[in-house]
Amino acid sequence: MTDQTMTPAEQRTEAAAAASAALDHDLAETEIAEVVKNAQDAADFLKILSHEGRLMILCHLVDGEKSVAELEKLLAVRQPTVSQMLARLRLEGVVETRRDGKAIYYSLADDRARQLIEIIYDMFCRTDK
């Protein structure tokens, strides 16, 4: 239908539909951009957990804070390696530190890590599978 054969009411309806479609298009672009950002954030977070040693550290920290020496024993890994993994986790904001004299204690700083580690534990570590 052309503008000449449409009634004023039909013209208003078509104009409103066009405006709505334009708004939906802008909204869709905004939603897509947000989904892409969320997917990137999730991928970045999973990269932090994708290292076997860092994952094991986080598994131990779910139970509560641990010193570097405790983690060294639990992981059977030398202190410089443990410290390097902890530094990456600290840089990413997943763990936080507390100093007590010469000892440095680490704990989880990100509840998302705790939630994900608990799910991973249920999937891979539970003995009553």
Image: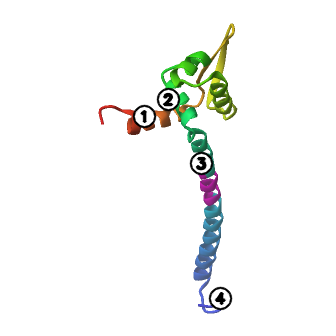
Q: Residue at x 44, y 38 (%)?
A: 120
When asked about the image quadrant of residue 107, the answer is: top right
- Amino acid under disc 2: Cys
- Crowdedness near tag 2: few (<14), some (14–19) or many (≥20) residues, C-alpha within 10 Å: some
Residue 119 appears at what percent x and percent y? Answer: 43, 37
Residue corresponding to mark 4: 3
* 3D distance between C-alphas at marks 4 and 1: 65 Å
- Residue 5 vs 39, above or below: the answer is below
Q: What span is in magenta?
A: 31-39
Residue 118 appears at what percent x and percent y? Answer: 45, 33
Residue 19 appears at what percent x and percent y? Answer: 64, 71
- Crowdedness near tag 4: few (<14), some (14–19) or many (≥20) residues, C-alpha within 10 Å: few
Q: Are marks 1 and 2 in contact (CB under 8 Å)?
A: yes
- Residue 39 vs 55, above or below: the answer is below
Residue corresponding to mark 2: 59
- Please, what secondary structure does the residue beneath circle 2 have? helix
Where does the C terminus fall, quadrant-wise? top left
- Amino acid under disc 4: Asp
Q: Residue at x 63, y 45 (%)?
A: 44
Q: Earlier in the sequence, mark 1 or mark 2?
A: 2
Q: Are marks 2 and 4 in contact (CB under 8 Å)?
A: no
Residue corresponding to mark 1: 121
